[in-house]
Image (cartoon, rainbow, N blue to C red):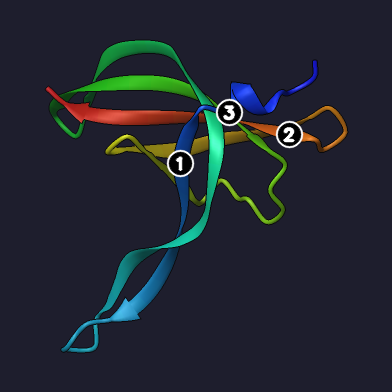
Amino acid sequence: MPLNAGDLAYRITIEEPTESRNDVGETILAWSTFSTVWADVQTMSGREAERYGLVVGVNAYKVTIRYLSGLKSSMRVVYDARTLEIGQINEKDRKFFQEIMCTELVAT
């Protein structure tokens, strides 16, 4: 399945976790930009679930990008003020593009 430039209509930022120290020397998790790329973003499903005693909305997305070396499931996608957790990365068409399966947790 060829991927056309016109299919990649959304600008996304892929962030990677970084550790730093606060004023009292504690390790804190921060996020830094790994790459900003064009993508196709499709909503796959939505449901409600209980997490830590709270009811949350769980939305599933498929994000398609041109192949990006170094992409890991520990990273996250920021798209249209949403933060999506990467669950799975599928390389397609001989590493020409990648499908990133993501979830978004939304407080209800």
- The structure residue drawn at horizontal position 32% and vertical position 66%, both measured from the top left corner, is 29
Q: Nearer the viewer, mark 2 or mark 3?
A: 3
92 left or right of 73 in image: right
Which residue is depicted at the point 45% across and 48% down? 13
Q: CA distance from mark 1 to mark 3?
A: 10 Å
| Disc 2/disc 3 C-alpha distance (Å) | 11 Å
Q: Identify the element where label 1 is drawn.
A: strand
Vertically, is 27 above or below 87?
below
Q: Quadrant of the N terminus?
A: top right
Residue 41 in the figure: left or right of residue 83: right
Look at mark 2 in the image and give the residue it sits on. Answer: 97
Q: Earlier in the sequence, mark 2 or mark 3?
A: 3
Residue placed most toward the observer, 24 or 80 = 80
Give amino acid for label 2: Phe
Q: Which residue is mark 1?
A: 12
Percent coordinates x, y for residue 43 in the rendering: 43, 15
From the viewer's perspective, is residue 36 above or below residue 86?
below
Identify residue type, mark 1: Ile
Residues at circles 2 and 3 in contact by the CB criterion of under 8 Å: no
Task: Rate crowding at label 3 as few (under 14), some (14 to 19) or many (20 or more) other CA atoms within 10 Å.
Answer: some
